[in-house]
Structure formats: structure tokens, C-alpha cells
Amino acid sequence: MELWFTEHHTPNVRFSIKVDRQLYSGRSEFQRIDIFDSKEFGRFLTLDGYMMLTEMDEFIYHEMITHVPMCVNPDAHDILVIGGGDGGTVRELLRYPTVRHIDLVEIDELVVEVCKKYLPQTAGCLGDPRVTIHYEDGLKYVRHAEDAYDLIIVDSTDPFGPGEGLFTKEFYGNCYKALREDGIMVNQHESPFYQQDAYAMQRAHKRIVDSFPISRVYQAHIPTYPSGHWLFGFAAKKRHPVKDVNWVRWNAIGLKTRYYNTQLHAGAFALPNYVEKMLRDVEPES
Ligand code: SAM
């Protein structure tokens, strides 16, 4: 008997992965949590039936959400990661000896516990002494932070369920306040392709543009996310993500990566015309 994991990317489009075994299934007060094992993608985590990460392709997402901002500001010492309970984002940040402290604000302790047990590839680093995990709502946590972080990475689920508050104007405004004068915020920014994802992306972009003087979007292809065309938001108080970058300095750090490189960084901000139009359509008249 064959077992398949299927995610509905739209009411008319499904994405399925053949599963060898289901390793875990449980429910926290926030969401259903499942871990599967598969030939094609290795182990993978889903929350409420939505794909979060697979062992095979998580490097793409976690490298792009971390090394782009770290290349723009390699002096980022104090970092806030909101969501990210699987540990992949934290793992990549810890590779920088200059990173002093990471506050990981994950609403669901069970996600961390399950990932520590079944996904050591991403969660194995969460015991690092530079990491403090706060099991609380990122929306509430950031209300009380001011001038505290060089970088905020919003590694959240989608804008419904527990993640909904992490796509609001209030949240982005409080992230701005929580950042230092040279601060950068990067967020998981949905996708331009399917209608529901595109609408969520435009809504998030408008709210970020209203909160930050510099707001750009960059892209990567992530095979297991809806359409494979995924976006990240880059917002900053001062730094432009491509113009103000010391590429030589980042390359001199000597980090070995499988997806990110500084040429791809610059190119990732060159978006398809239809995506540029979606963004322009929600930006204030210049
Ligand atoms: N890379 C994945 C993606 O792009 O969908 C996200 C990975 S991570 C598993 C997302 C995490 O965000 C989950 O562990 C979830 O519990 C957490 N989360 C959702 N809403 C949150 C909130 N309001 N505050 C803090 N963490 C939240």
C-alpha cells in the first residue's frame, strides 16, 4: 500500500510526496505537527498540513533568509528570529563568529521538541550558548523591544493561524522600533504565483513599505513550496541590499554554502516584470 503526503497549493493544484514512514504526528495548542520520511526529500516537517521544510531542500530557504542580510551587514551581532522553531535559520546564523546573541521567539515549544528529536539537521544547534529560546507569540514579544537588534528575521508560517499577526502593520512597526539605527528586517514573504499567495505577498509588502524607508523583495526557487517561486522581504533603516554591499568582505569570511553566493544575492533582487508590477501596484505613488 502506497502512502502519499499531499498539500493543496490551490483548490485545483495538489503537490504530493511519496512517504516511506510517518515518524511523528501530534497536536499542540497551536497546530497539528507531522514528520514524514521519504526517498525523494528525506524527512520533512508539516504544520497543519502545510510543508515547512525538507531535509533535501531546506538549505535553499535557510541560506537565502540569512546570508543575504548578513552579507549586507556582517557586523550584525544581536539578532532576533521570530518563528524558526525548526532551527535552520539559527543554524546558518551561528556560522558567523561575529554573531553575539540570538533570541529565538517560537510560539510552539512542541515544534522545537519534535524537530530536536526528528530533524537534528536543522534543530541540532538550538542548544548553542548564544541562543535563547522564548516560547511566546512574536507579535507580543516585539512590542516590548526597542533599539535592541541589528537584524530581525521573520521565519514564520503563512499569514493565517498563529502566523497571522506576523504580517500586520502593528508587527512591522514594532520590528522597526526593535531595530537599531542601522537595522535590517528580512521576512518569509510568500509567493507571486498563485492568487492567494500573491495577495498575501502584496498585502505584506504594502505594510512593510509603510513601515521602513528601504523595502525590497528578492527571490529563490524552493521545489517544495507552492509554485517553487518563493520571495523574501528585505527592509532596512539605512542599507540598500545591493548598492551598499561589500561583497569582498563577505567572501573573505569563507563560509561554504550550497545555494547562496554574492552574485546570486545581487541577481535575486532582479524580479520578473509581473512581480515588479505586483509590488508597484501596492506602493505609494512616488
Ligand atoms: N520555513 C517555513 C516557511 O517558510 O513556512 C517556516 C518554518 S518555521 C517551522 C515556522 C514557525 O513559525 C513554526 O514553528 C510556528 O510555530 C512559528 N510561528 C507561527 N506563528 C508564530 C508567532 N505568532 N510567534 C512566534 N512563532 C510563530
Image (cartoon, rainbow, N blue to C red):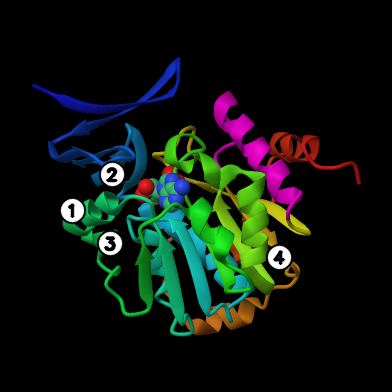
Q: CA distance from mark 1 to mark 3?
A: 9 Å
Q: Quadrant of residue 101?
A: bottom left
Residue, x 44% and y 52% (percent of image)? 137
Category of crowding for the residue at label 3, using alpha-carbon neighbours closer than 10 angstroms: few (below 14), some (14–19), many (at least 20): many
- Looking at the image, tell me whether mark 1 or mark 3 is earlier in sequence order: 1
Amino acid type of the residue that numbered disc 2 sits on in the rendered structure: Leu
| Secondary structure mostly taken by the magenta-highlighted segment of the chain | helix
Amino acid type of the residue that numbered disc 1 sits on in the rendered structure: Tyr
Amino acid type of the residue that numbered disc 3 sits on in the rendered structure: Ala
Question: Within the magenta stretch, is there residue 208?
Answer: yes
Q: CA distance from mark 3 to mark 2?
A: 12 Å
- Mark 3 highlights which residue? 123
Amino acid type of the residue that numbered disc 4 sits on in the rendered structure: Val
- Looking at the image, tell me whether mark 2 or mark 4 is earlier in sequence order: 2
- Indicate which disc residue 118 carries: 1
- Indicate which disc residue 242 carries: 4
- Indicate which disc residue 45 carries: 2
- Looking at the image, tell me whether mark 4 or mark 3 is earlier in sequence order: 3
Category of crowding for the residue at label 2, using alpha-carbon neighbours closer than 10 angstroms: few (below 14), some (14–19), many (at least 20): many
> Which stretch appears magenta?
190-211
